[in-house]
Image (tube, helix red, strand yellow):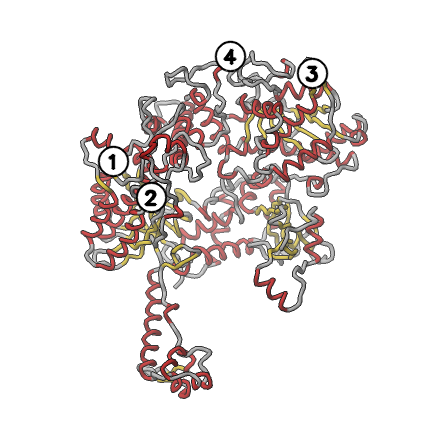
């Protein structure tokens, strides 16, 4: 795999009086430390004793580094020449052209992956983390300030700058350009070109961009999540950015080295390896992603002089790959308006089909099933909602206006579409709602089962209460008489107080002052208590959380094979006239071929692995295309922008899926889970497959039913398993049942996912029962057999806690040692903790010091009571100050609170070393110290709050 790839991993640290860049070269087993200090005393004038002391610190704090260490002082010209030659330095307008002129020395020209003699074995990739935003911007600024032009304009005059100047620029980036740091160089043409040319080489890659789901998550958090070291420097906290000793500088370097050595560990994770390989494969397969068009041929003109200015690199986004693969040159044309005609006219003519309006078809489908006017009115809410889209334009781009000229329709926006209650029950043949429902939307279809028994119980109680009130009103038309009677005997013999039916304002005195004909106002209004499966929540009508339900049953899983891809093909969505083909369809067909080849044992393991990687590349394009073609923001450019066509496809797809589910419900099914591209149906297999075959033929997509056991809370939290209990997949709050993963940021120990997944399978027959701790403990006792590797087991029990040092949302983790309550201990930003048994040493009781936002009600109450508007907790303020946060955002006060999910009384052990690398005896010691009852507490809370069905 790519762990042997020729690569450099680098990272920059900038303090007020020290600037460092560590560059780790795994193949050479060495780290180069470039440093710039304003006080030579910090390095002992580059003395041998200092270098030995720093090397000792580096190795002591980085167990996974045993290589050579080289120190390069950036006050010296030779060190700067080496840095420039290593990273590449050019302000040529077309850096990929070896003959292009640069004001920097020719020896500094970077090797590009488009050079005729390029070889990755000779020219390494440079990997940073968030480097596209920060590190490369800092480097571009550093180089242009360090290398000055001579009289003839050649930048060969070296002049060292100060660490203070770099820190000032660093502070500017974080205060003014935090999300768009390259913008800070826009007014400096040389620096802008240097920065651009880093990227144009194709060799400067940002590891964070290879994990698009978690690209904004801090490196330390990901490393901790995967069991690696979490090493932080106190000198990087706000207000603590000045070094005062050689020891502090050595500590900073050790921290800097930790980042780059462990960045390599992150990159070697299979997910990052896979993303790297598949995107590299796409670049190799489609040279038009890198090179300009050859004249008007719609083919790439390959050569270093013809690299496109918007070329893609391995760390480009999936959406960018989808756009360029489907339309490398020019752009595609959107439909003039949203339409529900299916399939596309060109496809219908080719296949001999008749186009039909799917929205009208869905209405006819429902009306033929049910003639009840109320049911039809319920369906019409969905119909009316989608009808608002028909014939309208949702493409705000200037390209749309260019394409249609006078025929262009005015731009509609989702905000102009009237919101409807688009929740709809699946109805049984007799017209009664089943226990399952669906929610239609613009983006996709979602549905699940709701707690029908609980709703019926609540409704029966309400109806009884309403009947009691009606009886009392009839018995006492004047509520004053009821008040004077004090109690009432109901028809079934129950005796109720007047308070059950009259409001708190119904005093005798108040009613006597009120005319008889107006006294009805003193009776309670029970209408607001009437239960409803759906209720308004923040402007949307959603399932009442009270009726949330965990389905647990053997199902027919109807996976609509490549549903969106097939729909897009049938709507001719990405047909490219100039390309002469629908490359989307070609990629889909290639994926189908690879599905067969990757399982074909006639091929070698290496070949099957390459087929698997290429298949993932095809899936990346197929799955990213709809999002890339439907950006909501008019400022987002996309050569495959077709808001109208994609919106049509999504709505048509939802209607097709709904009709399948409703047809099966009519035949007696429960559709316990619905997604746009699949259903989970509880119905006898023969009936299920017969209906499925008929509906699939109507849609024109393949549907492969398979039996599996489903435990599902909603579309985001579910688990699939075989009948004998083998887990096939899990998502949401069960996703980490096998191990921690960089694609999910956990807020609890992963062992809870595993424990709950096993418990839910064991208790699948009755998920309304309370949590059975004895059974859960029996499951937990199997942990050593489920996770025999000690490091793996430790990852399952760890919990990663994070502080937030932003001014607007501040929180810092701190703790007390057992029995010591005077001096709080502030922890670093990211920490790995384990729950230990009470009374053990090396434990803390943990809390959160936060900047709590004052609510209007709190402000009003304090003003009324004459209290200060802000009432800072002294302890919290002490902790926040210790973390370098001297000022809180306006309207926030320092407060102490619990860490969500953790009890402050628990004994927590902080272990930020790499648990993957601990000595087995140390790993065993941690595992033997864990308080397994507390982990059961977490599992019980998760079960009771999220999975148990209310009765």
Closer to us: mark 1 or mark 2?
A: 1
Q: Is residue 491 left or right of residue 916?
A: left
Look at the numbered disc 1 and give the secondary structure of its residue: loop
Q: Residues within 10 Å of mark 1 (few under 14, many from 20)?
A: many
The spot of residue 494 in percent (x, y) is 36, 82
- In-front residue for pair 140/679: 140
Residue at 27 percent of width and 37 percent of height: 702
- Tell me the residue that label 2 is attached to: 676
The circle on residue 272 is none
Q: What is the secondary structure assignment of the residue under circle 3? A: loop
Counting residues from the N terminus, which is met first, the one under dot 3 or under dot 4? 4
State the image coordinates of residue 538 (x, y, percent, origin top left). 44, 56
- Report the mark closest to the observer, 2 or 3: 3
356 on left or right of 5: left
Query: Rounded to the nearest whole Å, what is the CA distance between mark 4 and mark 2?
Result: 48 Å
Where is mark 3, residue-wise?
156
Whether residue 263 appears in this view of the structure is no
Q: Is residue 437 visible?
A: yes
Q: Residue at x 52, y 55 (%)?
A: 936
The alpha-carbon separation of the residues under discs 4 and 1 comes to 47 Å
Name the residue that disc number 1 marks. Answer: 343
């Amino acid at each position: 795999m790519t762990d042997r790839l020729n690569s450099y991993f680098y990272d920059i640290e900038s303090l007020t009086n020290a600037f460092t860049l560590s560059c780790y070269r795994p193949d050479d087993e060495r780290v180069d430390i470039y440093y710039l200090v304003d006080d030579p005393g910090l390095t002992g004038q580059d003395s041998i004793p200092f270098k030995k002391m720093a090397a000792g610190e580096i190795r002591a704090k980085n167990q996974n580094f045993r290589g050579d260490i080289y120190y390069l002082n950036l006050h010296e010209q030779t060190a700067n020449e080496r840095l420039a030659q290593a990273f590449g330095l050019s302000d040529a307008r077309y850096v990929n052209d070896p003959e292009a002129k640069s004001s920097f020395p020719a020896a500094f020209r970077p090797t590009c992956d488009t050079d005729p003699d390029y070889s990755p074995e000779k020219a390494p990739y440079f990997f940073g983390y968030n480097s596209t935003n920060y590190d490369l911007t800092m480097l571009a600024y550093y180089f242009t300030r360090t290398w000055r032009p001579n009289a003839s304009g050649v930048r060969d005059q070296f002049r060292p700058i100060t660490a203070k100047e770099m820190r000032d620029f660093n502070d500017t980036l974080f205060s003014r350009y935090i999300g768009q740091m390259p913008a800070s160089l826009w007014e400096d043409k040389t620096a802008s070109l240097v920065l651009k040319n880093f990227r144009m080489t194709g060799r400067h890659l940002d590891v964070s961009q290879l994990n698009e789901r978690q690209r904004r998550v801090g490196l330390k958090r990901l490393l901790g999540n995967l069991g690696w070291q979490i090493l932080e420097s106190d000198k990087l906290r706000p207000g603590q950015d000045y070094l005062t000793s050689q020891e502090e500088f050595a500590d900073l370097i050790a921290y800097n080295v930790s980042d780059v050595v462990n960045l390599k560990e992150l990159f070697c994770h299979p997910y990052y390896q896979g993303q790297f390989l598949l995107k590299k494969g796409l670049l190799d397969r489609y040279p038009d992603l890198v090179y300009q068009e050859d004249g008007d041929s719609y083919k790439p003109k390959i050569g270093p002089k013809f690299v496109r200015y918007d070329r893609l690199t391995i760390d480009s986004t999936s959406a960018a790959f989808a756009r360029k693969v489907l339309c490398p040159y020019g752009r595609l044309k959107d439909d003039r308006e949203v339409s529900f005609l299916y399939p596309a006219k060109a496809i219908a003519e080719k296949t001999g089909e008749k186009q039909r309006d799917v929205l009208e078809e869905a209405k006819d489908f429902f009306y033929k099933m049910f003639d009840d006017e109320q049911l039809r009115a319920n369906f019409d809410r969905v119909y009316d909602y989608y009808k608002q889209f028909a014939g309208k334009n949702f493409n705000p781009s200037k390209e749309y206006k260019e394409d249609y000229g006078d025929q262009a329709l005015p731009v509609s926006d989702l905000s102009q579409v009237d919101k409807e209650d688009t929740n709809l029950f699946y109805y049984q043949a007799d017209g009664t709602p089943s226990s399952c429902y669906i929610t239609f939307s613009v983006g996709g279809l979602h549905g699940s089962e709701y707690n029908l028994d609980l709703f019926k119980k609540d409704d029966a109680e309400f109806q009884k209460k309403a009947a009691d009130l009606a009886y009392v009103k009839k018995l006492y038309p004047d509520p004053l008489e009821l008040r004077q009677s004090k109690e009432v005997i109901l028809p079934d013999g129950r005796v109720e107080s007047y308070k059950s039916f009259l409001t708190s304002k119904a005093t005798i005195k108040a009613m006597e002052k009120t005319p008889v004909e107006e006294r009805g106002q003193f009776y309670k209004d029970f209408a607001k208590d009437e239960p409803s499966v759906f209720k308004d929540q923040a402007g949307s009508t959603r399932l009442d959380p009270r009726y949330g339900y965990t389905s647990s049953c053997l199902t027919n899983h109807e996976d609509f094979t490549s549903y969106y891809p097939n729909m897009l093909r049938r709507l001719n969505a990405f047909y490219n006239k100039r390309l002469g083909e629908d490359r989307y369809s070609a990629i889909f067909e290639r994926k189908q071929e690879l599905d067969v080849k990757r399982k074909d044992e006639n091929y070698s393991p290496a070949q099957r692995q390459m087929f698997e990687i290429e298949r993932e590349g095809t899936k990346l394009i197929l799955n990213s295309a709809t999002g890339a073609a439907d950006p909501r923001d008019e400022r987002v450019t996309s050569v495959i922008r077709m808001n109208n066509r994609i919106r049509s496809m999504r709505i048509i797809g939802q209607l097709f899926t709904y009709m399948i589910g409703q047809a099966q419900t009519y035949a007696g099914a429960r559709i316990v889970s619905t997604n746009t591209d699949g259903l989970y149906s509880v119905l006898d297999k023969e009936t299920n497959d017969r209906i499925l075959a008929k509906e699939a033929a109507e849609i024109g997509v393949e549907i492969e039913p398979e039996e599996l056991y489903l435990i599902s809370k909603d579309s985001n939290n579910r688990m699939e398993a075989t009948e004998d209990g083998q887990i096939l997949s899990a998502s949401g709050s069960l996703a980490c049942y096998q191990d921690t993963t960089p694609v999910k940021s956990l807020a609890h120990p992963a062992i809870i996912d595993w424990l709950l997944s096993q418990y839910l399978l064991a208790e699948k027959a009755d998920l309304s029962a309370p949590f059975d701790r004895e059974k859960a403990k029996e499951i937990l006792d199997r942990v050593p057999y489920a996770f025999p590797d000690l490091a793996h087991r430790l990852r399952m029990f760890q919990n990663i806690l994070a502080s937030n040092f932003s001014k607007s949302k501040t929180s810092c983790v701190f703790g007390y040692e057992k029995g010591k309550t005077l001096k709080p201990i502030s922890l670093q930003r990211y920490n790995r903790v384990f729950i230990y048994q009470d009374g053990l040493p090396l434990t803390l009781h943990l809390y959160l010091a936060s900047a709590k936002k004052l609510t209007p009600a709190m402000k009003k109450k304090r003003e009324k009571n004459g209290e200060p508007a802000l009432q800072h907790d002294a302890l919290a303020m002490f902790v926040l100050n210790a973390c370098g946060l001297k000022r809180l955002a306006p309207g926030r006060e320092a407060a102490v609170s619990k860490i969500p999910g953790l009890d402050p009384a628990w004994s927590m052990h902080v272990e930020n070393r790499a648990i993957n690398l601990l000595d087995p005896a140390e790993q065993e010691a941690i595992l033997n110290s864990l308080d397994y009852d507390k982990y059961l507490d977490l599992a019980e809370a998760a079960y009771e709050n999220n999975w148990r069905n209310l009765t």
